[in-house]
Image (cartoon, rainbow, N blue to C red):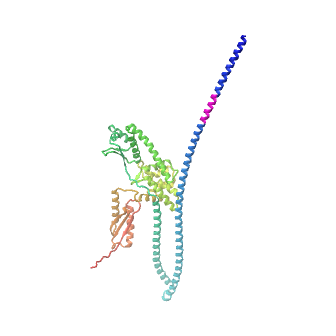
C-alpha cells in the first residue's frame, strides 16, 4: 500500500513539474514573440529614418548639381555672346580689308595706265626736244631726267604725306576703338585711401574700459595688433591708426568683438586678437580664391592666392589694388582678344602684376621686383615673371604680354575717377606743365586743361609759322615726357592764328 501511495505521489509530482515546465516554455515563447515584434518595429523605424536621410542627401546633392549646371549654362551663354561679338567684329574687319584690297587694285590699275600715258608723253617730248634743240640725245635725256626727278620727287612727297596722314587716321581710329571697347567693358569702383579706421561706441564709458587701469588694456591691444589706438575727446568714437591695412582691419574686427563681448582685459584681448588673426587669414584666402574665380584663373600657388587676397586691403592713390588687378586683367584680356593673342596668358600676367604690393611694406625693393621674385619662386612661367618685372619699365619687356600688361595698367590707372592725387601735387603738376610749355621761344601763353590731360599752347604768329608749330608741339611733348611722371597721356595742342582787325567809322 505504501508503495502504491508513493507511486501515486510520484506521478502527481511528475505531472506538476511537467505543467510547470510547459507554463515556463509558454512564457519563454511569448517573450520571444514580443522581443521579435519589438526588434521588427525598431528595424522598420531605423529603415524609415535611413531612407529619409538618404532622400535628404540625394536632394541636397541634386540641388548642388542643378546649381552647378545653371552656373555652367550662364557661363557658356556669356562665352557664346562674347564669341558672337568677336565673330561680328571679325566679319566687319574682313569686309573692310576686302574693300581696301578692291580700292588698292583699282588704284594700281589707274597708276599703271598713268605710267603708260607718261611713257608716251616722255617719248614724244624727247623727240620734240631732239628736233627743236641742238642738244645731243644724251644731253637731252640728262636734262629731261633732271626735270622729271624734281617733279616726281615733289609728287612722291605729296603722295607719301597723303598716305601717311590717311594711315595715321585709320590706325588712330582702330586703336581708339580697341581701347574704348576694352575700357567700356570693365570699370572698377573708386575707393578712398586711408590709414585710419574709426569705431563707433555706444557710450563714452566704453573708452575707460578700452584704456583700462593705468592704460594696461590699450597697451596690451596695441602690442598684440601693432596698431595705434587713439582715444580723444571726440564723443562716441575711437580711432585705429596704422599703415599696414591688413593689421588695421584685423584690429578693427578684434576691437568690435571686445566691445560687444564687454570683457576687456589683457588676457581676453590676447585671446580675441589670436582668434581674429586666424579669421582674417581665412577671409584673405577666401578673397583671393573669389578673385581667381571671378577672372577665371586657376592653378595658382596658395601663397600667391594669399597675396591676391591681401590686395583687398591695399590701396594706391585711392584705387583698391584688388579691384585694380581685376580691372587690368579684364582690360588685358579684351586687348589680347582684339590683337589675336593668347587670352589666358594675358589674363594671368595682368592678374599677378601687382602682387608685390602685398609685401612692399615688409621687403626691400620695388613692388615690381618683389612680385617677380615671388612669381619665380612659385614656378610661374617666364612670360608671367617678365610681365610683372617690366610693367613699370624697371626691366626690359621680353614678350608682347609685358607690353600689353603695361598698357592695361596705364589705362586702369589713368581712367577718369580711378585714382586721386593730393591737391598740392595736382596743382604743382599743372603749374609744371604750363611752365614747360612757356619755356620755349615764340610761346605767348599756355594753359593746362582737362585735369592736366591737355596743354593748350598759344604762339606768336609772327615768330612761329605752321611748320615750326608742328615741331614745337613735338618738342614740348618730349620735354614733358622727360620732366614729369603722370598716368595715361597728355595732349599738346599748339594754336597759331593771325587776326586782322579794322573799324568802320
Q: Nearer the viewer, residue 451 or 197?
A: 197
Q: Is residue 195 within the magenta segment?
A: no
Rendering quarter of residue 169: bottom left
Q: Quadrant of the N terminus?
A: top right
**Do we see residue 397 in this rendering?**
no
Residue 68 placement (x, y as % from top left):
54, 50
Q: Position of residue 322 (x, y in %)?
A: 44, 52
Furthest residue to the left? 505
Q: Is 250 rendered above or below residue 2?
A: below
Q: How many marks?
A: 0
Q: Residue at x 36, y 39 (%)?
A: 217
Up-down relation of residue 126 to residue 17 (above or below): below
The C terminus, quarter of image: bottom left
Where is residue 298? Give x, y as percent: 52, 51
Is 339 in front, or is 30?
30
- Any part of residue 313 in sight: yes
Q: Position of residue 422 (x, y in %)?
A: 35, 56
- In magenta, the rendered stretch is 30-43
Instruction: Verify whether residue 41 appears in magenta.
Output: yes
Determine the main secondary structure of the stretch shown in magenta: helix
Amino acid at each position: 500500500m505504501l508503495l502504491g501511495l508513493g507511486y501515486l505521489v510520484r506521478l502527481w509530482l511528475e505531472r506538476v513539474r511537467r505543467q510547470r515546465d510547459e507554463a515556463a516554455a509558454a512564457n519563454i515563447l511569448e517573450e520571444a514573440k514580443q522581443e521579435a515584434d519589438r526588434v521588427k518595429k525598431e528595424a522598420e523605424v531605423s529603415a524609415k529614418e535611413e531612407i529619409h536621410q538618404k532622400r535628404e542627401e540625394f536632394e541636397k546633392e541634386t540641388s548642388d548639381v542643378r546649381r552647378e549646371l545653371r552656373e555652367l549654362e550662364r557661363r557658356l551663354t556669356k562665352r557664346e555672346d562674347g564669341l558672337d561679338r568677336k565673330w561680328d567684329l571679325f566679319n566687319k574687319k574682313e569686309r573692310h580689308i576686302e574693300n581696301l584690297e578692291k580700292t588698292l587694285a583699282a588704284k594700281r590699275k589707274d597708276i599703271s595706265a598713268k605710267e603708260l600715258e607718261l611713257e608716251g608723253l616722255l617719248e614724244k617730248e624727247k623727240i620734240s626736244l631732239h628736233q627743236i634743240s641742238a642738244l645731243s640725245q644724251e644731253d637731252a635725256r640728262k636734262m629731261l631726267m633732271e626735270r622729271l626727278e624734281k617733279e616726281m620727287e615733289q609728287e612722291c612727297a605729296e603722295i607719301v604725306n597723303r598716305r601717311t596722314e590717311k594711315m595715321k587716321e585709320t590706325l588712330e581710329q582702330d586703336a581708339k576703338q580697341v581701347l574704348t571697347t576694352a575700357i567700356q567693358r570693365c570699370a572698377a569702383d573708386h575707393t578712398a585711401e586711408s590709414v585710419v579706421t574709426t569705431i563707433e561706441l555706444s557710450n563714452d564709458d566704453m573708452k575707460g574700459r578700452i584704456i583700462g587701469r593705468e592704460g594696461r588694456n590699450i597697451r596690451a591691444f596695441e602690442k598684440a595688433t601693432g596698431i595705434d589706438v587713439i582715444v580723444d575727446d571726440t564723443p562716441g568714437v575711437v580711432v585705429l591708426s596704422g599703415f599696414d591695412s591688413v593689421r588695421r582691419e584685423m584690429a578693427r574686427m578684434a576691437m568690435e568683438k571686445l566691445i560687444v563681448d564687454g570683457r576687456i582685459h589683457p588676457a581676453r584681448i590676447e585671446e580675441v586678437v589670436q582668434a581674429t588673426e586666424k579669421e582674417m587669414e581665412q577671409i584673405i584666402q577666401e578673397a583671393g580664391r573669389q578673385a581667381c574665380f571671378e577672372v577665371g584663373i586657376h592653378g595658382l600657388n596658395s601663397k600667391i592666392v594669399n597675396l591676391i587676397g591681401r590686395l583687398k586691403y591695399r590701396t594706391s592713390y585711392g584705387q583698391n589694388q584688388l579691384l585694380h588687378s581685376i580691372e587690368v586683367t579684364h582690360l588685358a584680356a579684351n586687348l589680347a582678344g582684339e590683337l589675336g593673342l593668347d587670352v589666358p596668358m594675358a589674363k594671368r600676367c595682368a592678374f599677378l602684376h601687382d602682387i608685390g604690393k602685398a609685401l612692399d611694406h615688409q621687403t626691400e625693393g620695388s613692388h615690381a621686383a618683389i612680385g617677380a621674385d615671388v612669381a619665380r619662386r612659385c614656378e610661374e612661367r617666364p612670360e608671367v615673371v617678365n610681365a610683372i618685372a617690366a610693367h613699370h619699365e624697371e626691366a626690359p619687356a621680353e614678350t608682347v604680354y609685358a607690353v600689353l600688361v603695361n598698357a592695361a595698367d596705364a589705362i586702369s590707372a589713368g581712367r577718369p575717377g580711378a585714382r586721386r592725387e593730393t591737391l598740392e601735387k595736382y596743382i604743382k603738376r599743372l603749374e609744371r606743365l604750363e611752365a614747360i610749355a612757356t619755356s620755349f621761344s615764340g610761346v605767348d601763353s599756355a594753359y593746362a586743361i582737362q585735369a592736366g590731360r591737355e596743354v593748350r599752347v598759344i604762339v606768336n604768329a609772327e615768330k612761329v609759322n605752321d611748320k615750326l608749330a608742328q615741331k614745337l608741339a613735338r618738342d614740348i611733348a618730349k620735354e614733358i615726357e622727360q620732366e614729369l611722371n603722370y598716368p595715361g597721356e597728355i595732349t599738346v595742342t599748339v594754336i597759331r592764328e593771325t587776326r586782322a582787325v579794322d573799324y568802320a567809322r
